[in-house]
Amino acid sequence: MNPDGQEALIHILLHLSFFILTWWCLQAFRFDVFIRRPESLKGRLLIILFAIAISYSVSSFFIDYFDFSLYLRYLFFTL
């Protein structure tokens, strides 16, 4: 497997794992306070979109953090 394929696989797995974690955490949130019918199709779709938005932001943060930490070696060593 080439490095680009490995990186793509890691990104996909990170995005999916953070989506599952976010979905699980959002189940504890009371959407009935803000949404008229949270069990309806529109309510469920809104919850899924919230989960996607939050999980993408969190996983992108961790991916960027990891990438930037790898670039720190160029601060001290020029190879």
Image (cartoon, grey):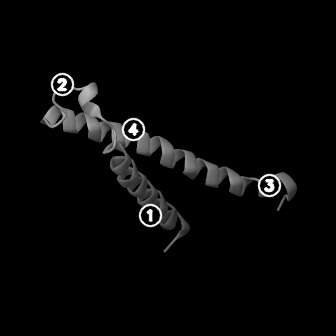
SS at badge 3 = helix
* Picture quadrant where residue 31 is located: top left
Residue 9 at x, y = what percent? Answer: 44, 64
Mark 4: which amino acid? Ala
**Contact, CB < 8 Å: mark 4 with mark 1?**
no
Residue labelled with disc 4: 53
Q: Nearer the viewer, residue 47 or 5?
A: 47
**Contact, CB < 8 Å: mark 2 with mark 3?**
no
Q: Nearer the viewer, residue 35 or 1?
A: 35
**Looking at the image, is mark 1 or mark 2 earlier in the sequence?**
1
Distance between mark 3 and mark 1 Cα atoms: 25 Å
Residue 69 at x, y = what percent? Answer: 70, 54
Distance between mark 1 and mark 2 Cα atoms: 39 Å
SS at badge 2 = loop
Distance between mark 3 and mark 4 Cα atoms: 32 Å
Residue at image location 49% in from the left, 49% down from the top = 59
Mark 2: which amino acid? Arg
Residue at image location 67% in from the left, 50% down from the top = 68
Image mark for residue 36:
2
Distance between mark 4 and mark 2 Cα atoms: 21 Å
* Picture quadrant where residue 13 is located: bottom left
Rate crowding at label 2 as few (under 14), some (14 to 19) or many (20 or more) other CA atoms within 10 Å: few
SS at badge 1 = helix
Residue at image location 34% in from the left, 37% down from the top = 50
Select label 3 or label 4 by which is in front.
4
**Looking at the image, is mark 3 or mark 1 earlier in the sequence?**
1
From the viewer's perspective, is 10 left or right of 22?
right
Residue labelled with disc 3: 74
Rate crowding at label 4 as few (under 14), some (14 to 19) or many (20 or more) other CA atoms within 10 Å: few
**Contact, CB < 8 Å: mark 1 with mark 2?**
no
Q: Nearer the viewer, residue 75 or 44?
A: 44
Residue labelled with disc 1: 9
